[in-house]
Amino acid sequence: MDSKKAHINVKSLPKHIAIIMDGNGRWAKQKGMLRAFGHENGTKSVRETVEVCAELEIENLTLYAFSTENWNRPKLEVQTLMKLLVSSLKKEMKTLQKNNIKLSAIGNLDSLPSKVRNELKDVMNQTETNSRMTLTLALSYSSREELLNTVKEISIKVKNNIISPEKIDESIINEHLYTQNLPDVDLLIRTSGEQRISNFLLWQIAYAELYFTSVLWPDFTKQHLYEAIIEYQKRERRFGKTSEQLS
């Protein structure tokens, strides 16, 4: 058994891990290669992370794959990312089925190229009955856009007397988010040394433990994931209470 894995307490695992996979471009640049080379190598880290989470029985894993702001990147890089997404979905279907993983996606999916949407739909349909873990890809995702859409949807329902303003609470908001079928995030990991949230799951990470590592995403291995989980398990999650109340 991996020495780091042996230090993980299987009784207090996070139910939902979210990852901002950052550093592909810098990794490629350090090697004198095009940014696309970094994105291609980043897929290996995705595969390893997904397999390890399934093995540990983590119920939900959400990966920030492409933000709405990423559309502003150079055209060639965006095209490469979209092609990579299609080929990865095709390639990883066996891994998802073998590990009993359900694929889901959140974000403004209508803005994705039709080829990506169709491939995504196909993999999601084929894995919808899988139950070991839910892997969610955040694609063309913006948390502010998600919250804006939520406010609009609830406002329309209030206007049409479907919801009364007095009844609006956290559960009503949760029901209108892209992540309505997912629990709140327990552990948020960001690679590459940047220490910011970048418009990712702002509502859902209200009480998440934040873990930042300087490791660039293509270099992120299962050992790094074990380290993040071990660090998470050392922390006291109080949710606004005192230590004495918890004990």
Image (cartoon, rainbow, N blue to C red):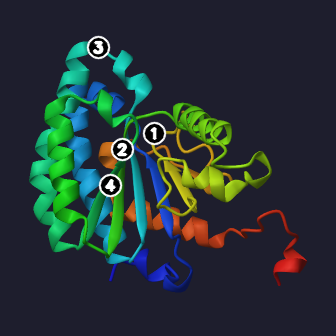
**Number of marks in the rendered image:** 4
Q: Position of residue 80 (x, y in %)?
A: 18, 27
Horizontally, residue 200 falls left or right of residue 215, namely: right
Horizontally, residue 103 falls left or right of residue 161, namely: left
Q: Kindly state the secondary structure of the residue where label 4 is placed.
A: strand
Q: Is residue 76 above or below residue 82?
A: above
Q: Position of residue 75 (x, y in %)?
A: 24, 14
Q: Residue at label 2?
A: 217
Dot 2 or dot 4, earlier in sequence: 4
Q: Position of residue 191 (x, y in %)?
A: 46, 44
Q: Position of residue 104 (x, y in %)?
A: 32, 55
The mark lying in front, picked from 3 and 4, is: 4
Dot 4 or dot 1, earlier in sequence: 4
Q: Residue at label 4?
A: 104
Marks 4,1: beta carbons within 8 A: no
Mark 4 residue crowding within 10 angstroms, few (<14) / some (14–19) / many (20+): some
Which quadrant of the structure image shows residue 50?
Answer: bottom left
Dot 2 or dot 3, earlier in sequence: 3
Marks 2,3: beta carbons within 8 A: no
Horizontally, residue 231 falls left or right of residue 235, namely: left
Q: Residue at label 1?
A: 192
The mark lying in front, picked from 4 and 1, is: 4
Q: Quadrant of the C terminus?
A: bottom right
The amino acid on which the numbered mark 2 sits, given as a three-letter code, is Trp
Any part of residue 83 in sight: no
Q: Residue at label 3?
A: 74
Mark 1 residue crowding within 10 angstroms, few (<14) / some (14–19) / many (20+): many
Marks 1,2: beta carbons within 8 A: yes
Residue found 30% across the figure and 44% down from its top: 218
Towards the viewer: 208 or 219: 208
The mark lying in front, picked from 2 and 3, is: 3
